[in-house]
Amino acid sequence: MPADPATGAPAWRCALVFGEAPAPYEEEWQQGPQACLPTTTEVTAYGNFPEAFANAGPAGHRYPVSVEHFDIEDEADMCGALRAAAGNPDPCAEQAIALLTGALESVTGVLDRRVRCLVGYLAGALTAEGMDLLRIAVAAEPGGLPLNNELHLLVRDFDGRTRRLALAPAVSLPATSPRPATTLTSRIALTTALLSECLWMNNNNQVTFHVSFKSPGVDLEFEDGETPEEADAYGRLRRLDDASFAAVLAESERNAVDMARGLAGDYEDEASPEIPGDQLVSWLGRELLDTVTTAVTGAPGKTPTLVYCAGFPLEFAGDGACLLMVGPERIGVIEIDDSY
């Protein structure tokens, strides 16, 4: 989600809540003259209200005030979120993108390309296999006035399972209050999880990324206890200068984009897309590299003292790969498993 442009702090809080409703063939929902919509009492049960922002306690509870229905029907498709992220959403995701974009831009202004990719992916994942989409106006207390700056969307699938997205501006904190920070571990975990969703070797196996940090001088467990320099000498690792590092990263990114486009069936435009452009996998790959590099060097924008690699540039041929970056006080290792 976009950050506050003035402070850099998170500008939004977001939650996903799961529930259950009657299946569409048991209870039809529709808008219009023959409107047949669930009541606010029923929506409270179907969407597991008042739970919304659990970390806020009772202040995070929300109570339905009114319901608006959008008719959608999304076929089962494991790649719909990727297509939506790349700017080619199906009608279901397109409706959710419009609602999400409107809510976000009303507070933080026009979204940049990276955020638009994430919004597209979120919309595609939210509406996947959906049959109905509800926009629910909510109040902060029972019988209260609707909150105009929040968005609550509920999707029902063919079996009646529901998932509800709650989106609201972050609670303002006094200047003296400590702001919650995304830890390095959680940032890496979120980025690598999304990266894996973009890259599949087949229907069952994702490309996975494992990041670890070690202190200089610690045994890095290379074959026969080799140092990086010895592994380089034997061809098991290759040392990269700045130009070579940039070159293998660029080729790896291009190959990742091609793989993600193929997975999403994006063959309408044979021309190579702009990078990073609207390709979520590009933004995520850069985010992972920047996060690990900053952790290794101690400051954004600095380059590692030494870089070694094996299996780069990435070709996703099932052989695996490893990238090792050495900084003044830390060594960062990114291991990539692309086995079938």
Image (spheres, helix red, strand yellow):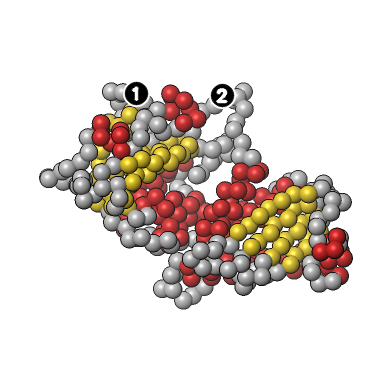
Please name the residue that numbered disc 2 is placed on.
174
Residue 214 x/y as whole percent: 78, 49
Q: For the point 45% across and 54% down, which residue is it?
A: 121
Name the quadrant containing residue 27.
Answer: top left
Q: For the point 43% across and 62% down, which residue is it?
A: 79
Disc 1 to disc 2, how far (Cα)?
24 Å
Q: In the picture provided, is 51 more to the left or to the right than 302?
A: left
- Secondary-structure class at tag 1: loop
Residue 304 x/y as whole percent: 78, 55
Residue 172 x/y as whole percent: 51, 28
Q: Amino acid at mark 1?
A: Glu
Q: In the picture provided, is 186 more to the left or to the right than 158?
A: right
Please name the residue that numbered disc 1 is placed on.
141
Check residue 66 in the rendering and tell me which mark sits there, or answer none. none
Q: Nearer the viewer, mark 1 or mark 2?
A: 1
Number of residues whose C-alpha sits closer than 10 Å to that of mark 2, classed few (under 14), some (14–19) or many (20 or more): few
Q: Earlier in the sequence, mark 1 or mark 2?
A: 1
Q: Residue furthest bottom?
A: 270
Number of residues whose C-alpha sits closer than 10 Å to that of mark 1, classed few (under 14), some (14–19) or many (20 or more): some
Q: In this orientation, which residue lies closer to the viewer: 281 or 193?
A: 193
Q: For the point 74% across and 49% down, which residue is it?
A: 213
Q: Amino acid at mark 2?
A: Pro
Residue 261 seen from this side: no
- The number of numbered discs placed on residues in the rendered structure image is 2
Name the quadrant containing residue 37.
Answer: top left
Vertical order, 333 against 149 (above or below): below
Vertical order, 58 against 211 (above or below): above
Name the quadrant containing residue 339.
Answer: bottom right
Q: In this orientation, which residue lies closer to the viewer: 270 or 207?
A: 207
